[in-house]
Image (cartoon, grey):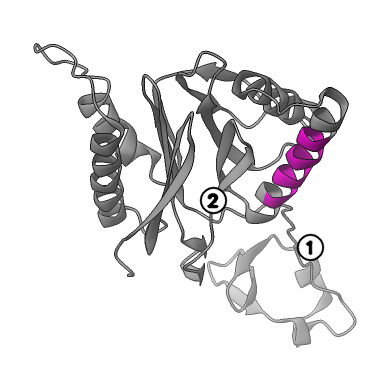
Amino acid sequence: MMNSTTFGAPLMRHSEGQVVLGGNGEDVVVKPADYPGREQPYEHRFSPYDFNGGTVAGVSGEDYLVIAADTRMSSGYEILSRNTSKLHQLNPNAILASSGCKTDMDQLRSVLDIKSKIYQHNHRKSMTATSTAQMLSNTLYGRRFFPYYAFNVLGGIDAEGKGCLFSYDAIGSFERTQYSATGSGQAYVIPFLDNVIGNRNRTEEKPTLSKEEVVELMKEAFVSAGERDIYTGDALEIMVMTKDGVTKETFELKKD
């Protein structure tokens, strides 16, 4: 048992207890049992968020939208599900793709579904893609002090019949763009899209791609991302929207 004068000595954390820094050059590991009745401090952490990984991407064309996401849901180094959809059709004109915290993504979808239904009941028509984009921005901004941990890409067909795509941050700032990606594999997908869709740093004329070509490019992008990002994998869910409706396709990715 150590004497009471040790209480005044400086303490340092140790894996087996605390280290009393001795003045004579000798450090002693002090365990809780050495000081009966003296409570040892404990630190408790809580976070309302969890990052469940995954990657989403979208490309808008002259008369179509291609939007895609993998189906893996993870937490840390654990795969929780291999078949979780990150795509959600809000109305006939818009599709939402989200990555981030699964519970926040689900809650955000529920809120947007309710607002879309209220709009339809009040106006007797579906919300346009651009109006849906603004609604999503307002919804995210309304939670700016306790944000949804969801990073979103929203796309659809606008009132002119053209494909449109909108990219968001967590609190609702957004922009209309031809292509976008977010999630754990964003850093791998965006350079690919910059090259083949944006035609960045190329001398030849920018090509006009069909929706079938874009679908194949999406598959290549996610195969590449899955090789480097452990949170992207299992399967790729692709939705293609035109003025005639929505088609859906699933493409297998690596499972490990």
Residue 36 sits in which quadrant? bottom right
Q: Is disc 1 placed on a helix, strand or loop?
A: helix
Relative placement, left or right, of 191 versus 14 is left
Name the magenta segment's main secondary structure.
Answer: helix
Residue 144, compared with residue 6, is above or below; it is: above
Can you name the residue that lies furthest to the left here? Answer: 204
Residue 164 pos. (x, y %): 48, 22
Mark 2: amino acid: Lys
Q: Is residue 38 magenta?
A: no
Q: State which quarter of the image contains the C terminus.
A: bottom left
User: Which of the two discs, 1 and 2, sits closer to the camera?
Assistant: 2
For label 1, the residue is 8
Relative placement, left or right, of 243 versus 61 is right
Q: Earlier in the sequence, mark 1 or mark 2?
A: 1
For label 2, the residue is 86
Relative placement, left or right, of 218 versus 196 is right
Can you name the residue that lies furthest to the right here? Answer: 37
Image: magenta residue range: 106-117
Mark 1: amino acid: Gly
